[in-house]
Amino acid sequence: MKKKFFLNLILLVSLNLVVKPFWIFGIDRTVQNVTGAEAYGFYFSLFSFSLLLNILLDAGITNYNNRVISREPEKLSVWFSQLFLIRLLLAVVYVIVSIAIAIILGYSPRQLHLLWFLILNQFLASLILFFRSNITGLHLFKTDSVLSVADRILMILLVGIVLWGHVTDQPFRIEWYVYLQSLAYGIVAVAAFILVLTKTKFFRPRFDKMFFFRIVRESFPFAVLTFLMALYYRVDSVMLERMLPDGARQAGIYAQAFRLLDAFVMYAYLFSVILLPLFSRMIKEDKPVTELVKFAFLLMMIPILILGITTIIYRYPVMHFLYLSHAEASSDVLGLLMVALIFASSGYLFGTLLTARGDIKQLSWLAAGGFLLNILLNFILIPRFQTIGAAWASLVTQAGIGIIQILMVSRRLRMPVNRMVPLRTFVFAGIITLTSLILYGSGMNPLTGYLIQLALSLLLAVMIKLIPLKQMITILVSVKE
């Protein structure tokens, strides 16, 4: 399983490292610089709002389906036919509730117009994830790796043509950005649907009331967990836009820093995509997961530590390099969000393991506590500290949830802990903090220093064996499956 995990992880991460950073820093960042913080904040808060009610769109079906198909692949044909129709019915509910709440919140006609397309995008994106859950459930990780970047490749092409192709004399509008995303999502959703169809014996969607209520009942805990996690991860920008007089601008400033959190945490998320079906099957077959957990932890958390700590030290030059305005304000937000990154990333390992075990109820209670804490902190801190207050709320929430998840795994699985690993990790974090400060104060070009520090830290991690290079090489040269 370790070899299967690592080889597929290399493909998945490699594809995403090529495509996603260009999308985030080449396209998404350019759109914000071209349209301005206020226009982008207008979009970003609506985008976050469209994510908050994903519980109605997905109802936990994607994660539940992934877990079931990975354990019992023979169920694919029946489940896919039934679940596809259920997803369409849930989409209708999602649209009605989302628009109703938006009207109650007093969104303007322009906001409602854009929200319609963002809702469509959420439906298409969730449909793609549902199709991919069948692919990964069958352990077809190479196919899933290609699908994971297909929508972004199309978006890069479409948005890039409009941004730089001189196809119009008009200034780029934020609405165009959303329309082009809709087109890309639609194309990939059709392609993913066809791919899943080729793996099924039949496709006969029909409404079965008993099956519907069974799925809703069994997947509901997954839905609650996903909903609560989305709330405490995305509600900050919505509250900034709604609570402050210049809310759109403040949401845009927050988005500048949040973009890097979202980009870096994607690395950890990719681990969970492969780990969930692997953990699920190993637990069902009563195989030990300790070695895989340790291997994944080192491969995930050491690079995250390097990125997080180095970016905290170099936050001002990084933000001034990326953005044309409000770089100073968003730099302070970035420093706090990079600390939150470390705790959020750990959840993609330990939270995924607990999900595979079926500890959904406990995770949901934990997420509910995190959401309430996040809301309370935002209500207290945003009016006084604005974006910094929202960042502190995110940091405290992510830290609390991350630490509790680690304690839950330690207690429930009783995995033997090598005390030298956390000790070496702590010392390593101290060393890269010190060297980053020294390099930052040396007078070297900050961006050059940033890249050198990242490279030196990675080399140090390999030298002191925090990154298991020997195991990685052994796996790569091995011919035995």
Image (tube, rainbow, N blue to C red):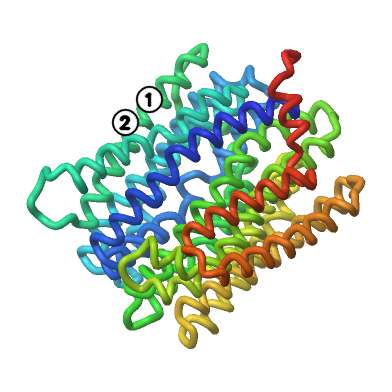
Residue 329 image-quadrant placement: bottom left
User: Relative to 439, does residue 245 appear above or below in the rendering?
Assistant: below
User: Relative to 48, does residue 468 appear above or below in the rendering?
Assistant: above
Assign a secondary structure to mark 1: helix
Alpha-carbon distance for marks 2 and 1? 6 Å
Task: Check contact, mark 2 vs mark 1: CB within 8 A.
Answer: yes
Which residue is drawn at the image coordinates 45% and 25% (left, top)? 206
Tell me the tag on residue 60: none
Task: Tell me if 303 is positioned left or right of 203 in this view.
Answer: right
Q: Which residue is mark 2?
A: 187
Which residue is drawn at the image coordinates 57% and 75% (left, top)? 392
Extreme residue in the front direction: 443
Q: Which residue is mark 1?
A: 191
208 or 420, which lies in front? Answer: 420
Q: Amino acid at mark 2?
A: Ile
119 or 23, which lies in front? Answer: 23
Task: Tell me if 299 is positioned left or right of 316 in this view.
Answer: right
Task: Tell me if 246 is positioned left or right of 392 in this view.
Answer: left
Q: Amino acid at mark 1?
A: Ala
Residue 97 image-quadrant placement: bottom left
Whether residue 358 is visible, yes or no, is no
Where does the image place residue 14, in percent across and percent down from the top left? 53, 34
Whether residue 428 is visible, yes or no, is yes
- Label 1: few (<14), some or many (≥20) within 10 Å? some
Which residue is drawn at the image coordinates 69% and 25% (left, top)? 4
- Label 2: few (<14), some or many (≥20) within 10 Å? some
Which residue is drawn at the image coordinates 26% and 56% (left, top)? 114
Please state, as top left, top right, bottom left or bottom right, where the N terminus lies in the image: top right
Where does the image place residue 344, in percent across and percent down from the top left? 63, 57
